[in-house]
Image (cartoon, coloured by chain):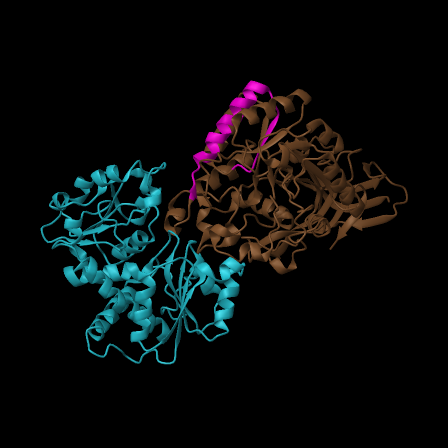
Chain colours: A cyan, B brown
Amino acid sequence: MQHNPQLNATGELQHLLSIEGLPREVLLQILDTAESFAGVTEREVKKVPLLRGKSVFNLFFEPSTRTRTTFEIAAKRLSADVINLNIAVSSQSKGESLLDTVANLSAMQADIFVVRHASSGAPYLIARHVKPHEHVINAGDGRHAHPTQGLLDLFTIRHYKKDFSRLTAAVIGDVLHSRVARSLIHGLTTLGVPEVRVIGPQTLLPSGVESLGVRVFHDMREGLKDCDVVVMLRLQNERMGGALLPSAQEYFKSYGLTAEKLRLAKPDAIVMHPGPMNRGVEIDSTVADGPHSVILPQVTFGIAVRMAVMSIVAGN
Amino acid sequence: MSLHIKNGRLVDPATGKDGTGDLYVDGGKIVERVKSPSKTIDAKGLVVSPGFIDLSARLREPGFEYKATLESELDAAVAGGVTSLACPPDTDPPLDEPGLVDMLRRRALSLERSRVYPVGALTVKLEGKALTEMAELAEAGCIAFSQANAPLRDTQVLWRALQYAATFGFPVWLRAEDAWLAREGVAHDGEVATRLGLPGIPGFAETVALSTILELVRATGARVHVCRLSTAGAVELMRRAKAERLPVSCDVGIHHVHLCDRDLGYFDANCRLEPPLRSQRDRDALSRALAEGTIDCLCSDHTPVDEDGKHVPFAEAEPGATGLELLLPLALKWGQARELPLAATLARISSEPARILGAASGRLALGAPADLAIFDPAAPLRVAPETLKSQGKNTPFAGYELSGRVRTTIVEGNVVYEA
């Protein structure tokens, strides 16, 4: 097996490409650093000078509003210069290759590339070709990984539940197409969550998903029993009406989270969702806006977590 | 030119004979003795065997000259000791017209290196709709008909194509892959693809298609060679089909007996292959079946891809790897792992593919074509892409320490390569 491309020779975080393969200590270092930044975001002057003079390039080969914005805010709070490139509509359509785009931006003295791409593994390709002082942060690649989302999910869970070692967590819905699910599952198993469940119809679970260290449930009621953490995944509309699922209505009936189903989980269970939500498809509004929901705090924590990741890679 | 090759270790895979001796060549054939040879080759310490026969090597002409040319790839072939190769029809335009085949053969002949056996397109433009003029193509030199990696979704067309080919006794070479099940897939549907978030091609995409092919062979009596097996399930189906004495044969590529999906590592685009690298269990079954003879031969599935085709994210990468120059060392590595005698190992890349091609080569018999490879089986070889003669530099074996170096290659009695 090749050397883990995320870590430098001394085992420190050089790039953040995936949660898989990151040692527990590195995950905890990120979460602890994020904790220290959480205070910054509540101050009146929401800035620290850690990345002053550094340039962060947001390279989004796939449209995104939320993730791009939170990365931008995080970089600005660290006093970095932020350049947003919406490549989905610029050079790629002119036929420029991914690596040429990166080489050109690198010539403009970049320090951090935040990359989102529709193809699994694209950030690895970029990381292999950037200069030694440049860092790549994966902001979502295909179905593969979305490590900062996974980290902010972990941060949220720790915030509300404190101790990972006694939890039962369930990830529900379209695991097959979900980079969020993969990142979170690796994070939960690395941090010692004793039971991680995935719940969904066979058509939305990738083959051999058990090998990720999860228990598989097809019956949502059974899978929700005694859960401390319930993570709903977004179900994209284009999955409907094809060979994967017959209809949104039927999906909601079997796998949508309602207040009634949520009662099967522990009384103090938290409900999470990476957004954007499809109300009435995977989650009922009464749950999304209800007392168990920590969906909006997730967004807030996302900024601190992304500040932590950027400051750590830039410091290594 | 007449040759005297002396003191070599003569290995004849066709008979299993293996012993030190001299070999004489005259008039392009192996002969009993030559009185005054025009050239003497000292083969002391080297193996003298029939030249290798590769059932799948893409030369990229016509149409893809920016990836490779006949010159570059036939240079690679002779450097790898490959004296005959079959080239699939997936050129641009595809080999679906006699004129194209004729031109390819003439170009290849004029280069005076390996023998090139064109495989004609089974359907026009490889679209899987209309049959090609197989009789005309055969006259122009096609030795079989194939879809290469292009899908043939319509089973009615496949049925008719096999009937038509059977009418004339033309062999049909097919990859077994259900196009619907394989749709959008880029890696073996299993643990690794699940972790990497790559769309998968299930193993049963191969067995479903192979079951269909075998059923149509039963119905039509067509002679079918199944290309590039990749699963243990397909091996089992072939075992049963052969026991039933169906007129079928099959091959496996060098990558699939040595590598599996775990070798994708962190999205190594060199491992983007068709069919995909499958599980360890599949790999082991393929390796064993090749030793037992359920799989008839080993081929390089040589596919030169330019850098631009690989310097992209895994799923977007063009499938394929260079292989002509690695066929011998990888065959030797496989044979060693299976503890086979050298003659048995070499049979998979000489006498067995010769049988499938219906060629007279692939043996060291008197009167056989003097297509020979002289090589040092123990000479270490570190796979360094930049030293390959092929224009395709991409291979998952880059950096591997192998052994087996070709010293001399002879085609029809002419020395075409000397290291």
Quadrant where the N terminus of chain A sits is bottom left
Image: B114 above or below B244: below
Q: In this view, does A306 lie above or below B408?
A: below
**Residue B183 appears at what percent x and percent y?**
46, 40
Task: Identify the residue at image location x=50%, y=73%.
Answer: A107
In-front residue for pair B73/A203: A203
Q: What residue occupies the far left of the structure in this picture?
A: A267
Specify whether residue B223 is painted magenta. Answer: yes
Q: Position of residue B192 (x, y in %)?
A: 40, 48
Q: Determine the residue located farthest toward the right in the rendered image.
A: B36
- Magenta range is B200-229
Q: In this view, does A32 lie to the left or right of B185?
A: left
Q: Is residue B356 magenta?
A: no
Q: Can residue A198 be seen in this view?
A: yes
For the question of whether residue B247 can be seen, the reply is no
Q: In which quarter of the image is residue B164?
A: top right
In-image side of B239 versus B364 (left or right) = left
Q: Residue furthest top?
A: B219
* Quarter placement of the C terminus of chain A: bottom left
Identity of the residue drawn at 42% across and 54% down: A118
A55 left or right of B4?
A: left
Give above or below for A124 relative to B20.
below
Residue B193, position as x, y percentages in the image: 40, 47
Across and down, in percent, residue A144 comes to 37, 53
**Pick the front one: B294 or B186:** B186
User: In the drawing, does residue A258 fall left or right of residue B304?
Assistant: left
